[in-house]
Image (cartoon, rainbow, N blue to C red):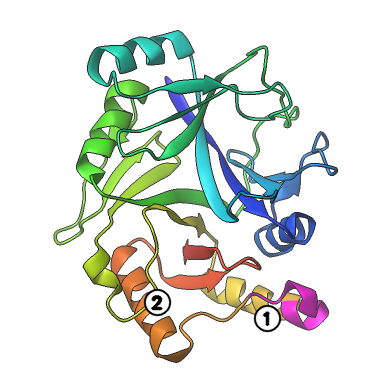
Amino acid sequence: MFAKINHVAMVSTNYAMLGKFYEVLFGMKTSPNTRPQSAVTVGDGYVGLNINPRRPGRAGGLDHFGVQVEDVETVFERMGQKYPEVNWLKRPGNRPFAGITTHDPDGNIFDLSQANMENRQDVYTEGEWQQDRYITHFAVRTLHPEKCAEFYCDVLDLQMTNREEGDENYYVTDGRMTVVLMPWDITKYANTGISRPGPDHFAFRVESIDAFKADTQAMIERNQNLTPPGVGIGPEGKARLDLFDRSTPYARHYLSDLDNVMLAVAE
């Protein structure tokens, strides 16, 4: 496997409590090497969720995903040959997952690293593990989803997966984790607030939707500070949830995290 989608990143003013939310509800584990003074990192054994503090001038919410590859120089060579408009930037050495940040042809940002990269820190030293609840998708709404999907296949050797009839999304996967490229069309927001192109949501697989709902209620009863905001409330909320439902054929349940980042859940 040339590339592994190894992390999802968020930005939050409430990053410590948000880490607890994912730890309690999804069973994610906090890294022993996390940096609590500057970020919280939890993981599911395959994908790390890095929750960064929001700083002045930076938007909050779902921010980007990251990929670890066998050889970054091969990626640069492929970019130069077919996508010369794509640039990259070497990141500071205090970034746990990222050595380099780059973007696809639509400007969607993702991190790029390889094992033992000098300006990258390892936050998980205990290796991979398996658990019942884990991240499966990172979804981006973008203007040219097919072109972006081809980019990820050409440059990172991700594989395009088959779509069901009528599904407008494109899916590229490393075999376990999938990036969903969803078409962004302003006319789809006629009855609700308009969201710009960019990261839209991410998704989990759980062992049982019913058990997950029961655990959500139990979490709220034990600690009201972990209560997720309601979704689908009011006319605009219902319109947005309807759009979300039509855009996520892989999901059977939806909720928001504490920062209003949408989560899709399947079993």
How far apart marks 1 and 2 lie (CA) works out to: 20 Å
Left or right position of 62 against 251? right
- Residue 16 versus residue 6 in the image, above or below: below
In this rendering, the label closer to the viewer, 1 or 2:
2
Q: How crowded is mark 2: few (under 14 residues within 10 Å), some or many (20 or more)?
A: some
Secondary structure at badge 1 equals helix
Give the residue displayed 71% in from the left and 21% down from the top: 93
Q: Residue 207 carries which label?
A: none
Q: Mark 1 points at which residue?
A: 217
Which residue appears farthest toward the left when viewing the image? Answer: 165
- Residue 254 versus residue 65 in the image, above or below: below
Q: Is residue 69 visible?
A: yes
Q: What range of the chain is rendered magenta? A: 220-228
Residue 195, image x, y percentages: 40, 64
Secondary structure at badge 2 equals helix
Task: Count numbered badges in the picture.
Answer: 2
Give the residue displayed 23% in from the left and 18% down from the top: 82
Q: Name the residue under label 2.
A: 241
Give the residue displayed 25% in from the left and 70% down from the top: 188
Mark 1 or 2 closer to N-term? 1
- Residue 257 versus residue 9 in the image, above or below: below
Q: Which amino acid does label 2 sit on?
A: Leu
In-front residue for pair 120/2: 120
Residue 227 in magenta stretch: yes
Q: Secondary structure of the magenta portion, mostly?
A: helix
Give the residue displayed 21% in from the left and 37% down from the top: 147
Residue 129, image x, y percentages: 65, 38
